[in-house]
Amino acid sequence: MQPLRTLYRKLTEDEWRKTHPFSDNISKVHDIVFHPYRTDGQREEAYLLWMQRNQPCLFGRIAAASRRIHFCILDEEDILSSDAHIADKIEQERLEWKRRSLHPHESFSHPAHGFVVLATSPRLAMAAPDQNLRTFSEKLLSLWKVSEKKEAQGKVHSEWLYLRNPKKKEYLRFQFSVDFFMAQGDGRWWQDHRVPGGIAFTANSVGHMKRYREWYENMKKQTEWIAQTAMLTIAAAQETASGKATWLRPLVDGKPVVRDLKCPFAKPESLRKELQGMDWTRYAGHLHTDHSIRDEFFWADADKHPDVTRSEYIQDFGYLIDTRERDHHLFVHGQNVAEREVFGDIGNPVDYVRITTRYKKRVVPTDKEEAPSSAEALGASEVEKKLKEIRSWKLKPAELM
């Protein structure tokens, strides 16, 4: 395959976008991330704020609100460099993500349950969702070097993350699939998979989040929490002119598809209205949530094509709660791994030279010699003003489940 920079130059403009401008929330993020004087920290804050209020995945929203997402952001300068540079940058950020999440505590590191590889530029954001963009996306994913496997539902790409039990020397490894998002989804039927600025691959571990909440934050009833959060995520899918991309399935005669899988909710009658009477073992969709680069994203139609609606995927909730399922142990419970295996993969913590800690608000220098240039100061002021406008997107404590 050709170098990423060559594929980047082959991208074509999205003619549909000329008559269907980006949503206001996408445009506000573009004003920040494409600003010539924005800092890396400001760009990351803009993405975290957007994720909290403008995408349906509740797990992702919660992680974004607590800065538990690790970013590898590739701008145009990176994209136009060599493939080796891009692969090295992704691998370095991937390693930092895994190291910060291994044994997180106040005196050492701040965890991240998810990893985002984001390629961003005005050219990418405005590119047509055609074969050129698909080839570019496939090439970028190949530079991440995630594992790939053919499943019954299609090709699935996977990552993994480790977590240590803080009370004993026990390490768990969690597996999870890689998802895919594009700015091109804004306004199209697969709007749930949009992202400002370009394209993004995400890997989020529900199991790592669950175990962290249990082990490090002493939270209870987390099995019930992940089942409810997963169902609410599907229920929150965007209603478009072509309907939703995914949806909950109703119980049949009060029974789920997997009839011997007990309801995970202690008080089902107290569930939110949109979950009552819905199956906790299976859900449906015109796209499969385990897939990354999907065929459907690269068809010209902004609305659902007949080939999309002629069938639907039946997808699994059950693995989140069913301890009999192999995927439950891989994705949720976690697999026990030896310390030597963990350290062989990501290194021994005593050898780390850099780690991600809790975010601290930047202090503006007062010394005249350290003050930014007038052009930099003006740009920073503009970006800060734009950030202030979207900080209302931040989730309030009562909204965090």
Image: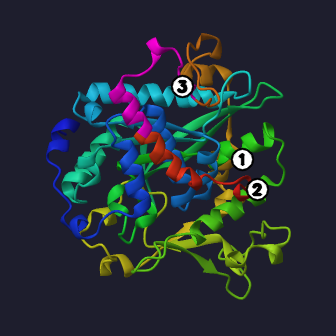
Query: Dot 2 corresponds to which residue?
Result: 223
Quote the CA–CA distance across marks 1 and 2.
8 Å
Residue 224 percent location from the top left of the image? 77, 60
* Sequence-wise first label, 3 or 1: 1
Kindly indicate whether the residue at mark 2 contacts the one at mark 1 (C-beta within 8 angstroms): yes
In the image, 116 versus 16, the foreground residue is: 16
Residue 153 percent location from the top left of the image? 45, 62
Q: Amino acid at mark 1?
A: Lys
Residue at (18% x, 65% y) in the render: 15
Q: Amino acid at mark 3?
A: Val
Depicted 353 relative to depicted 363: above or below: above
Using residue 316 as the reference point, say whether residue 126 is left or right of it. Answer: left
Query: Dot 1 corresponds to which residue?
Result: 210
Residue at (39% x, 64% y) in the render: 23
Query: Dot 3 corresponds to which residue?
Result: 364
Looking at the rendering, in which quadrant would you find the C terminus? Answer: bottom right
Q: Is residue 21 visible?
A: yes
Looking at the rendering, in which quadrant would you find the N terminus? Answer: top left
Residue 13 percent location from the top left of the image? 17, 57
Q: Amino acid at mark 2?
A: Thr
Using residue 175 as the reference point, say whether residue 71 is left or right of it. Answer: left
